[in-house]
Image: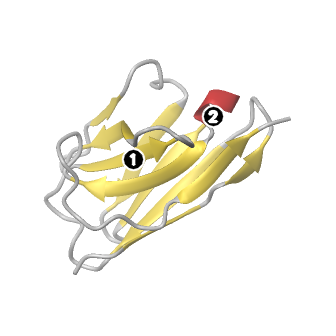
Amino acid sequence: QVHVVESGGGLVQPGGSLRLSCEVSEGAFMGFSMGWYRQPSGKQREVVAVITPSGTANYVGTLEGRFTISKDNVKNTLYLQMDSLTPEDTAVYYCNAGAPGPALWPWGQGTQVTVSS
């Protein structure tokens, strides 16, 4: 069974930055489109960024320019650089394979991002 472990969240002031990481079980990384998702409190989980096996990145809505998705195929790790954060970015962030379609793996515990002054 594939395991994912998200990390890097925390409390940050508006305008600040965070870099999230997602470590994936060895061997499970290759060949899948990977995505970062977020779930604000009381709302549904939504995809925010996708990266294809070839490395092409796509973003939802106006996040491009503030969020950057990347990956390290050797380390089996997915990243999300988030800049110019706003309170609306507050959510639990998750990663998974299969994006933007249905998630393929069990969900990890996620990492909480809180943007507040």
Q: Is residue 94 above or below residue 85?
A: below
Q: Residue at x 30, y 64 (%)?
A: 73
* Residue at left offset 25%, top offset 76%: 2
Q: Amino acid at mark 2?
A: Asp
Residue 71: x %, y % from top left: 37, 55
In the image: residue 17, left or right of residue 59: right
Q: Which label sits on residue 36?
A: 1
User: Is there a contact, CB below 8 Å, between mark 2 and mark 1?
Assistant: no
Q: Quadrant of residue 50?
A: top left
Question: What's the residue type where badge 1 is placed?
Answer: Trp
- Residue 85 in view: no
| Left or right placement of residue 61 versus residue 53 in this view | right
Relative placement, left or right, of 14 versus 67 is: right
Label 2 or label 1, whichever comes before in sequence order: 1
Q: Residue at the spot x=46%, y=18% of the render? A: 62
Provide the residue designation for mark 2.
83
In the image, farthest residue toward the left: 31
Left or right placement of residue 16 versus residue 68 in this view: right
**Quadrant that contains the C terminus:** top right
Secondary structure found at label 2: loop
Marks 2 and 1, Cα distance to the nearest angstrom? 15 Å
Residue at (37% x, 26% y) in the render: 60
The quarter holding residue 27 reads: bottom left
